[in-house]
Amino acid sequence: MKSKKILVLGVLLSCLIVFQFTENSCAESSGAMELVGLLTDQLGVTENQATGGAGALFKTAKDNLSESDYGKVAEALPGIGTLIQSAPKVSDSTAGLSKKMGGVTEGLGSLTKAAEGVNKLTAVTNQFSQLGLDQDMVSQFIPIILNYANTKGGETVMNLLKGAWK
């Protein structure tokens, strides 16, 4: 009798853990899917293109924000981790170009800031290309994502993303 109680408790505990995990995953997925829906509706892109494109932009933001600032963004926008995982991989040639541009910008004073902005989105442009999207689509994704971020996380989260992409 005692072993049956332990077994039942173990099964119940397992179900509770699975439920908690599933509930969190569902919340994250629904947040990501809401943004993907906005992108597909407003831009006429496929779900795969919306997911990968948003993921590419969020990956760039993650790479350019402090851990603390990225934490604020991720907390306000559940599901961006899933989107980041869906982003196409950056090709070696793009990574090499980013490093070269970083070296060129050293010591150029006022041009450095502009070059850094181009450098940040070089990988994104390559990733969009892998998704069958031209580079102009990057500038169409950004305002939709920023508006979504403002709606979900407020002006602070929107400005963090904006700064990460400049």
Image (spheres, rainbow, N blue to C red):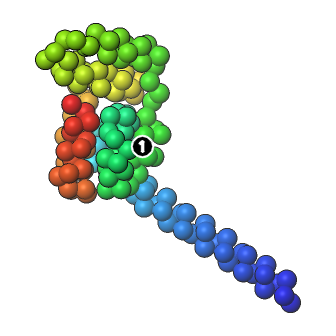
Above or below: residue 118 compared with residue 108: below
Query: Can you identify the residue that label 1 sits on?
Result: 83
User: Front-most of 10 and 144?
Assistant: 10
Q: Residue furthest bottom?
A: 1
User: Front-most of 163 and 145?
Assistant: 163
Q: Where, quadrant-wise, is the N terminus in this rendering?
A: bottom right
Above or below: residue 121 compared with residue 29: above
| Residue name at image x 47 percent, y 40 percent | 85
Q: Residue furthest left?
A: 110
Q: Position of residue 124 (x, y in %)?
A: 34, 27
Question: In the drawing, does residue 144 fall left or right of residue 12?
Answer: left
Q: Badge 1: how crowded within 10 Å, few (<14), some, or many (20+)?
A: many
Q: Position of residue 142 (x, y in %)?
A: 23, 37
User: What SS does tag 1 mark?
Assistant: helix
| Residue name at image x 23 percent, y 24 percent | 117
User: Front-most of 146 and 114?
Assistant: 114
User: Front-most of 119 and 77?
Assistant: 119
Residue 57: tell me if it is visible. no
Q: How many marks?
A: 1
Q: Quadrant of residue 123?
A: top left
Q: Position of residue 164 (x, y in %)?
A: 26, 36
| Residue name at image x 49 percent, y 58 percent | 25
Q: Amino acid at mark 1?
A: Leu
Q: Where, quadrant-wise, is the C terminus in this rendering?
A: top left
Above or below: residue 126 compared with residue 165: above
| Residue name at image x 37 percent, y 34 percent | 63
Residue 16: tell me if it is visible. yes
Q: Quadrant of residue 144?
A: top left
